[in-house]
Amino acid sequence: MTSVSGAGVVVTGGGGGIGRAIAHRLAAGGARVVVNDLDAGAAAGVAAEIGGFAVPGDAGTEQGVRDLVTAARSHLGEIDIYCSNAGSGVGGPASGPDAPDEVWQRAWEVNTLAHVRASRALLPAWLARGQGTFVVTASAAGLLTMLGSAPYSVTKHAAVAFAEWLAATYAHRGLSVHCICPQGVRTQMLADAGRPGEILLADTAIEPGQVADALWEAMAGGRFLVLPHPEVRDYYGLRAADTDRWLRGMSRLQRRIEEETG
């Protein structure tokens, strides 16, 4: 079980959406929260709402992560919980193998390497004291897939894989890892996904606060997977048990998207 009251917390991508909801939920539980976001005004706004501290910057770059960890430690003393939440979005006019290298690279930097870089900065101190909590905001796309966006899907798979590796490697040394894998969440990212996102996700989309509540419950219960949409567990099981059947179903869904979007 992760203790939140009095903990020093960092939330990247905390200026809106899921990050803002996580910052609010953990602050309500007694945490001292550093809010990071590319949008300095958004970071400052959320920090003001929760009595936190804003550290704007790009958590998708190596220097941005180093600067954030340094500033957060200066303010908090210790970082006890790091919520690696910032993400690079879904979709666009070229979202498959034809997507430009810079689109693939940005997705890789934000959706995967940001977690690697943060853990690199945090693990030595956490392992030395035998305690630390790392939260990765991945996606159900990382357990299943995301039709329409190869860069997003592939890098979210990598995010889940890295979170699993961290948990398997360091749990016995006091590291707690939680991996958040929602389907649609009513954020700007979902709105930006356009008609494909609406077809795939809108009907079951939830509010960001529901994701934060699911994380809170997983932290209390010591659970790795955070599934705000419980049905994802069944889909994940089907994918593993009968991959060909699952792929046939996804192919049918892809054809529906193509038919409805012209």
Image: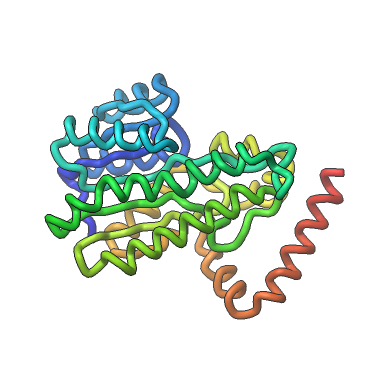
Which image quarter holds the N terminus?
A: bottom left
Residue 139, compared with residue 15, is above or below; it is below
Q: How many labels, in total?
A: 0
Nearer to the camera, 78 or 215: 78
30 relative to 147, above or below? above
- The location of residue 98, given as percent across then percent down, is 73, 45
The reply, left or right, for residue 236 in relation to residue 162 is right
Residue 81 falls left or right of residue 65: left
Q: Residue at x 34, y 22 (%)?
A: 44
Question: From this viewpoint, which residue is outermost toward the front?
Answer: 101
Q: Nearer the viewer, residue 8 or 108?
A: 108
Give the image quarter of residue 218.
Answer: bottom left
Residue 125 locus on image (x, y percent): 17, 50
Name the colouring of the figure: rainbow
The residue that appears at 60% across and 53% down in the rendered structure is 153
Q: Please state the horizontal and vertical placement of residue 233, each as a whole percent of the image.
A: 52, 68
Residue 37 is situated, as x and y percent measured from the top left of the image, at 40, 30
Against 237, is 170 above or below?
A: above
Q: Please say if 180 is above or below 45.
A: below
